[in-house]
Image (cartoon, grey):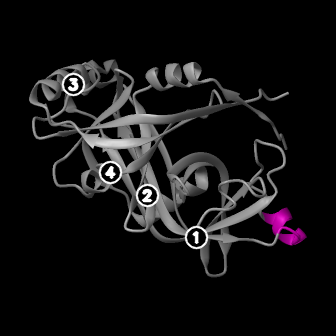
Amino acid sequence: MNDPWLEELSQNECMELLRRECVGRIAIIADQGPIVLPVNYRVVEAPSGPLLAVRTRPGNVIAQAPESVAFEIDAINPVSQEGWSVLVRGELLHADPTSAAFRDLYDPNPWLADRDAWLLIDSWEVSGRRLHGPDLLWHYRPGEYV
Amino acid sequence: MSSRGFDLLGTDECIARLGSRSFGRIGMKIADDPIVLPVFYALIDGEIVFRTDPGTKLIAAVLESRVAFEVDDLNEGWSVLVVGRAHEVRTPSLVESLQSQLDAFWPGSERDRLVRIEVERITGRRLHPVQ
């Protein structure tokens, strides 16, 4: 039996996954230390390259975060130990909330009301991993026998 | 477009949800930057326990520092955030006991080192259902 192993995802695969999903987790360094919170997001195709647009409540901990942030999306099945994750590291920029054009184009459609602070994550590193489960588990998949 | 409110979860509810899952994300500070990485874990005696390979920057970064740990179910619409301090488990009897408990969740290798997060603060929230 092999241990679970990790395969590095290409930049294209990472971006494809980022474009497909709509909820991720942002990590920031708050006063007391790091925190991680789920957020709605959307990939925005800016002239300089793709940005992640995040909408949050004005004045909350994310809106007041220092510039350096991390962002993560994943889909991992804890039973089969298979799935993937993508990590983005970048800078948090504040967008102009009065810009109607920006709102029409890039509304990340928040699940929560009053999310009127607009933030953009400009990445300096995007990486991803695919987790392959232990070989043993293949023996328990009926589909592998037919 | 649906905009929804959320309810805060009580401490017991947060602990129950943390204990019902085995996959979460650890947030920590490396140099001056935050990073967030997925990990398999177990809640044992009120602490989050997970394995890591020796020599990774993960172990160097987390030990004796304050970290965040997040678990969520985005389909059910809830998330739990733990803030606490990470320690390496070194006491041989404790290592053995924790390793055997973790093996019940997923097999590991003997080289793995064990990290535990002592929970200082636990908060959670649940989205209101879509109307």
Q: Which residues are magenta?
A: A97-105
Q: Residues within 10 Å of mark 3 (few under 14, many from 20)?
A: some
- Where in the figure is residue B6, as x and y percent of width and height? 75, 33
Q: Are marks 2 and 3 in contact (CB under 8 Å)?
A: no
Kindly indicate whether the residues beneath marks 1 and 4 are on one polypeptide chain. no
**In which chain is the residue bearing label 1?**
A
Q: Residues within 10 Å of mark 4 (few under 14, many from 20)?
A: many
Q: Which quarter of the rendering shows the N terminus of chain B? A: top right
Q: Tell me the CA gap for discs 1 and 4.
A: 21 Å
Foreground of the two, B95 or A98: B95
> Dot 3 lies on which element?
helix
Residue B108, compared with residue A55, is above or below; it is above
Identify residue for label 3. Answer: B98
Q: Is A139 on the left-hand or right-hand side of A85?
A: left
Q: CA distance from mark 2 to mark 3?
A: 26 Å
The chain letter for the residue carrying disc 2 is B
Cα distance, mark 1 to mark 3? 38 Å
Mark 4 vs mark 2: same chain? yes
Q: Nearer the viewer, residue A65 or B108?
A: A65
Disc 1 is placed on an element classified as loop
Circles 1 and 4 in contact, beta carbons < 8 Å: no
